[in-house]
Image (cartoon, helix red, strand yellow):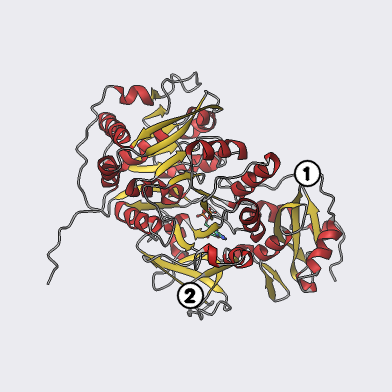
Amino acid sequence: MLGLMQDHPLLISTLLQHAATNHAKTGILSLDRDASGASLGTVTHTNYAELAKRAAKLANALDRLGIQRGDRIGTLAWNDQRHFELYYAISGIGAICHTLNPRLFPEQLTYIIRHAEDRWIFVDPTILLALEKIFDGIKDVPAGIVIMADRVPETKLAGQIQLLAYDDLIAAEADTYDWPIFDENTASSLCYTSGTTGNSKGVLYSHRSTILHTWAIASAEAIAMHRGTTLLPIVPMFHANAWGTIYAATMTGTTLAMPGPRLDGQSLYELITSSNTNYIGGVPTIWMGLLEYLRKSGNKLPAGMRGIAGGSALPPALSEAFWKEQGLRIDHGWGMTELSPVGAYNMPAKPLTQMSDDEIIAGTAKQGRPPYGVALKIIDDDGNELPRDGKAVGELVVRGSWVTSGYYKDDEANKTAFTHDGWFRTGDVSTIDEDGFIELVDRVKDLIKTGGEWISSIDLENLALTIPGIREAAAIPARHKKWDERPLIIAVRDEGAEIDADGVRDYLAKTLSKWMLPDAVIFVHELPHTATGKIMKRTLRDEYADYLEKHNLDQS
Ligand code: ADP
């Protein structure tokens, strides 16, 4: 017997309609900027009622351009109001919002646009150059390009393709739209992995998966969003949907403080204080930049702030600095583009007032536990589930309502992406404790395998970051004749710091067994980062693979 309940499909258009009706006064706060992106020192507020009208105008314009259901529309944009409008208008009409990452290498960007067959591309004027550079390789793909501004700037694309200005495109359109009702399993958006460990692969989200994920991350098990939240998404909207925060904002009436293109510590601090931000989300590299600025300037974050770090492991040293110097407990989260992206969130086990500093800091080391809607387990090489005891280590696999069921048009990748019974293989190696908390050991590909044992690169890096004077560190393997691989540490020093390689080794030797100590510690001015702010281990591994041999270091 079926239940006698109404059946309304879970559609993204309903989120913005909900916000316009029930949260008409909250919306987006943005710093006003000049053409170069520099702050003018004032803030503009656009509320959800106005945003819904602008999204409706855009939807009418998309119809006029001839965009059909299922068409992919590329966006090359920062976290700002027009990008927000695109998120809702494109998905709302049944087309697919394909967020493109402007920081990818030109070849990757070309590959992705061609693979997705983007019909139109919307581009921020500050990113136009990236599109100009790859234009010859993609010019047969889109029907036209819309510049996200009030006018089309001077560009060498003029005369080669139809060019429109966003504000002109929507100006004359009606500000109401009859949002269509369709199957909630319809594709809504498309995001390619940033290819930290291989080629970019497309993850195609649905309206249903998006709404279910949104409920989970907005809940008190995760960000705990509500009308009083002002959230600064530093994680880009082109990277795994800004962790879902753009949708969760309209679901809960949260105010979004949009950072635009400037993500340096000072710009972020200016936005935080002028918008009364009380929650921020970003990768550890961004938190590091903010910390550096706060230390240098002596400024303090407003009281009562919360935030999340994810995308790569949150070093305990960073967590400690924010807690002790700024009174902010960074929540830790784990996710992947393939998971919409949130797979685990680390909420404190009890109120912070009932915990010691050490407990609070240690509590952030784990990535968290899954919200209802996704299930996690660890398996051995034969696919057997391993115990949830916080000790057994295995590959983390996942299934659930917002987990990919297969990469977009990529049969090759799909052959190995799942276990025989349909769990998605994350490629991460982890423990799970009896409370369901995961603690990542490493990516399978980043483990350092030495003489039949392995060393966690995350552990080595976290420890190196507790050394005074070390700003950033990457632990990677180098080939070794006898032990196959031996660890190296590539590190960046704080300005003026005098710590040397012996100092690092002596420090590590206090905690680590001898066989875990790096064979060499190499200082560089800067580490390479991926488009999403992660250290590019693949590049470093290639560069330093033969380091021991080249430098005649002992390999006996
Ligand atoms: P890419 O695979 O291109 O880097 P993603 O952002 O989807 O793009 O990366 C997901 C991966 O990032 C995870 O599989 C994991 O290895 C890593 N990751 C994400 N969050 C964390 C975290 N909190 N701690 C350690 N690693 C993390």
Which residue is denoted by mark 1 in the rendering? 495
Determine if residue 401 is in view.
yes
Where, by quadrant of the figure, is residue 143 drawn?
top left
Taking 172 as reference, is 359 left or right?
right
User: Is the residue 296 above or below the residue 222 in the image?
Assistant: above
User: Is the residue 246 above or below the residue 132 in the image?
Assistant: below
Extreme residue in the front direction: 353
Label 2 secondary element:
loop
Quadrant occupied by the C terminus = bottom right
Q: Residue at x 64, y 61 (%)?
A: 316
Label 1 secondary element:
loop
**How would you rate the neighbour count of disc 2 (Cα within 10 Å): few for under 14, some for 14-19, many for 20 or more?**
few
Where, by quadrant of the figure, is residue 371 drawn?
bottom left
Q: Residue at x 55, y 42 (%)?
A: 104
Taking 354 as reference, is 320 left or right?
right
> Total number of numbered labels?
2
Q: Are marks 2 and 1 in contact (CB under 8 Å)?
A: no
Q: Position of residue 381 (x, y in %)?
A: 54, 76
Q: Position of residue 492 (x, y in %)?
A: 75, 49
Q: Amino acid at mark 2?
A: Asp
Along the viewing direction, whichever of 213 and 332 lies nearer the viewer: 332
Q: Amino acid at mark 1?
A: Glu
Determine if residue 141 is in view.
no
Query: Can you tell which mark lies on residue 435?
Result: 2
Q: Position of residue 320 (x, y in %)?
A: 64, 58
Disc 2 versus disc 1: distance between alpha carbons?
41 Å
**How would you rate the neighbour count of disc 1 (Cα within 10 Å): few for under 14, some for 14-19, many for 20 or more?**
few
Mark nearer the N terminus (2 vs 1): 2
Q: Residue at x 55, y 30 (%)?
A: 133
Ligand 1: does it lie within 8 Å of the C-beta at label 2?
no
